[in-house]
């Protein structure tokens, strides 16, 4: 599978590394060159300096042949916009956007975007753990 | 009209100032920098609120649900996109206007449901295009909803269409010649109007026929 990842932070670099280990063709985009140092030395994928909301940057990351696009930067709006570019302009089949703000996540999930909201996920996990502790 | 402006940079500042001075609309500016908000509030009164305009709670508190227009003029295209989309989807705002920096985002924003975009870059590019004297064919404006453009073209010396009537010229489908400037005269043409060298032709064209029309008129 060809995968383009925007954002080489902790999550982005981890996902890139895992997919690379599994043998997928991975390209990672980040605006900060230093972020790529989070990737292991034996990382075989590509690294592209730039912002993933720019069509030209996405093109040079190989978005036209991509089976999946993951927007995993710290910025909700950047993730949302890049995901929509990947879906609407390049017709990428699997597009996932990380959105921290639950209110925004709900809106874009309603618009058919595949979203992950860490805030909601962690909130739910903490609540479950607490509920389990109370039961014991 | 209730106009909600997001982003208190220079554009947002002067937009708010002008609209407030005009006095015919209700205006509210959302700006996230508390210091700017303080300064603006001193100048304009209580038409400035502090908050992040891309957050649902801020927009709700600002009364986005009853806003007629939301104008997003922050410095970042992605923020302006999300502000307008949230205004539209969550608060059913009838008209959203986004400032864009990357001219390539104009088409994208339209596809993503933004009603209007303003790009200083594009405005300047169009002005520059009109200033270049050798250019025989100039894009004047794009009509958003119909996917039409208004263009202006000179009929240069040696143009293959000079001396022919409009009815004789094989215009591409989807092109209408709206007016002809001949010296000081403005002609509203019919099929029997002849095109002459030196005429300035103003045409309404489907955007995908723009280059075909350019080639026909100027033989470029």
Image (tube, coloured by chain):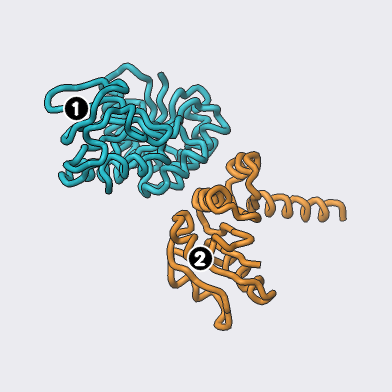
Chain colours: A orange, B cyan
- Name the subunit of mark 1: B
User: Can residue B117 be seen in this snapshot?
Assistant: yes
Residue at the image point whose x is 63% and y is 74% from the top: A20
Q: Which residue is drawn at the image coordinates 62% and 66% (left, top)?
A: A2
Quadrant assignment, res B154: top left
Q: Which percent across, then down, holds residue A96? A: 63, 54
Element class at badge 1:
strand
How far is disc 1 from disc 2 in space, using C-alphas? 48 Å
Position of the N terminus of chain B by quadrant: top left
Q: Residue furthest top?
A: B24
The one of B61 and A44 positioned closer to us in this rendering: A44
Marks 1 and 2 on same chain: no
Which corner quadrant of the image does residue B96 belong to?
top left
Residue B209 lies in what quarter of the image? Answer: top left
Label 2 belongs to which residue?
A: A61
Is B26 situated left or right of B133 in this image?
Answer: right
The residue sitting at 35% across, 38% down in the picture is B118
Chain of residue at mark 2: A
Residue A46 in the image: above or below residue B110: below
Name the residue at the right extreme. Answer: A136
Is B201 displayed left or right of A51 in the figure?
left
Neighbor class of circle 2 (other Cα within 10 Å; few <14, some 14-19, many 20+) is many
Of residues A133 and A7, which is closer to you in this image?
A7
Disc 2, SS:
loop
Residue placed most toward the observer, A124 or B170: B170
Seen in the picture, residue B188 relative to B58 is either above or below; the reply is above
Residue labelled with disc 1: B181
Residue density around tag 1, few if under 14, some if 14–19, many if 20 or more, within 10 Å: some
* Disc number lying in front (1 or 2): 1
Which residue is at 16% across, 27% downward?
A: B182
Q: Position of residue B175 (x, y in %)?
A: 38, 32
Asked if the residue under mark 2 is in contact with the one under mark 1, i.e. CB atoms within 8 Å, the reply is no
């Amino acid at each position: 599978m060809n995968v383009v990842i925007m954002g080489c932070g902790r999550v982005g670099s981890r996902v890139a590394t895992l997919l690379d280990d599994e043998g997928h063709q991975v390209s990672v985009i980040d605006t900060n060159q230093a972020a790529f140092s989070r990737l292991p030395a034996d990382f075989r994928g590509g690294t592209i300096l730039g912002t993933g909301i720019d069509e030209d940057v996405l093109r040079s990351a190989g978005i036209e042949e991509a089976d999946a696009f993951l927007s995993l930067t710290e910025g909700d709006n950047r993730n949302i916009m890049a995901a929509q570019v990947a879906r609407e302009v390049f017709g990428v089949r699997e597009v996932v956007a990380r959105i921290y703000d639950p209110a925004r996540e709900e809106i874009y999930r309603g618009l058919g975007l595949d979203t992950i909201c860490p805030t909601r996920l962690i909130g739910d996990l903490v609540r479950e753990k607490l509920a389990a502790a109370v039961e014991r | 009209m209730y106009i909600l402006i997001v982003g208190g940079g220079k554009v947002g500042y002067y937009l708010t100032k002008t609209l407030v001075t005009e006095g015919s609309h209700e205006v509210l500016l959302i700006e996230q920098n508390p210091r700017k908000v303080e300064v603006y509030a001193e100048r304009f009164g209580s038409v400035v609120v502090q908050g992040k305009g891309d957050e649902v709670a801020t927009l709700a508190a600002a009364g986005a649900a009853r806003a007629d227009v939301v104008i997003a003029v922050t410095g970042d295209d992605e923020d302006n996109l999300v502000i307008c989309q949230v205004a539209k989807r969550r608060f059913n705002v009838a008209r959203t206007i986004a400032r864009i920096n990357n001219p390539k985002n104009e088409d994208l924003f339209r596809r993503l449901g933004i009603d209007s975009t303003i790009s200083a870059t594009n405005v300047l590019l169009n002005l520059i295009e009109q200033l270049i004297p050798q250019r025989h064919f100039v894009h004047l404006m794009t009509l958003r909803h119909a996917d039409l453009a208004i263009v202006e073209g000179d009929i240069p010396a040696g143009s293959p269409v000079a001396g022919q009537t409009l009815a004789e010229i094989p215009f591409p489908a989807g092109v209408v010649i709206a007016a002809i400037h001949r010296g000081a005269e403005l002609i509203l043409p019919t099929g029997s109007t002849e095109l002459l060298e030196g005429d300035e032709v103003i045409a309404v064209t489907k955007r995908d026929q723009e280059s075909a029309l350019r080639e026909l008129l100027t033989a470029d």
